[in-house]
Image: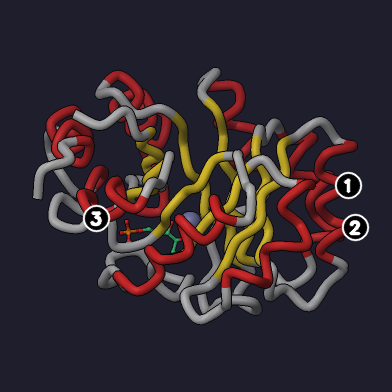
Amino acid sequence: MSDVKIAPSILSADFANLQTEVRDVLDGGADLLHLDVMDGHFVPNITFGPPLVKSLRKATDAVLDCHLMISEPSKYVEDFAKAGADWISIHVEAPDDVAGALKTIRAAGAVPGIVLNPDTPVERAEPFLEDVGLVLVMSVFPGFGGQSFIPDVLDKVPALRAMGFRGEISIDGGIAEKTAPAAIEAGVTIMVAGTAVFGQEDRAAAIRALRTDAA
Ligand code: DX5
Ligand code: ZN
């Protein structure tokens, strides 16, 4: 059994019963909650914004890990921090002042993170590594849950360690019982999973299955 942390993505939860859904995965052994924020511009899908984070903040003490798939994170990071986000990650590909947005996140009392799309070279993260607590490695192209895992991105995990990064390394997209062992082997400390957790009836069993490091 690996001690990798499991971060269920609420994207695959039943939004009408979100409080029950979130309690179910946390009781089932989830370590934190992954919140996928999409603006219909940076990615071709729209999800939710700070009001939902604020409601969830009242419902749980769990770490709220906000993944912002939005074009202008600088404009909104403070709102997410005020709403109660613990971690706020922004894409290195966002056409924005990424370094400035990371500073704003830190100043607002949240932990900043950087996200790399599958086709973005790991070197693009290097200038920001001293300023972030988390690197989120995308193993699908962002926008939708339920896509297939892209194994090539796993090389980024040891590459980040070779650059001296000591923070959390999270992998996001297509994580399931079959793909999790390779991610654990590569050295990730957090695995995000939407379909593989919320899509299963028994969430505790689903979470346990992801932590099993045998293929
Ligand atoms: C994709 C999101 C992921 C996604 C993961 O844009 O960032 O967090 O919800 O979903 P699964 O685990 O279903 O691939
Ligand atoms: Zn995500």
What residue is pinned by disc 3? 182
Looking at this view, is 156 or 116 the one in front?
Answer: 156
Identify which residue, 13 or 25, lies in the foreground.
Answer: 25
Q: Which mark is residue 100?
A: 2
The amino acid type found where label 1 is placed reads: Thr
37 above or below 147?
above
User: Mark 2, mark 3: which one is toward the viewer?
Assistant: 3
Residue 30 falls left or right of residue 116: left
Asked if the residues shown at circle 2 and circle 1 are in contact, with their CB atoms under 8 angstroms apart, the answer is yes
Point 81% across, 31% down: residue: 109
Tell me whether the residue at label 2 lies in contact with that at label 3, contact meaning CB atoms closer than 8 angstroms. Answer: no
Is residue 106 found left or right of 214 in the rendered image?
right
Question: Mark 3: few, some, or many residues within 10 Å (few <14, many ≥20)?
Answer: some
Residue bearing mark 1? 104
Residue 1's x, y, as percent? 18, 29
Give the Cα distance between marks 2 and 1: 6 Å
Give the alpha-carbon distance from disc 2 to disc 3, as whole Å. Answer: 34 Å
Numbered circles on residues, count: 3
As helix, strand or loop, the secondary structure at mark 1 comes to helix
- Up the image or down, 206 lies above or below 28; here it is below
Secondary element under disc 2, as helix, strand or loop, is helix
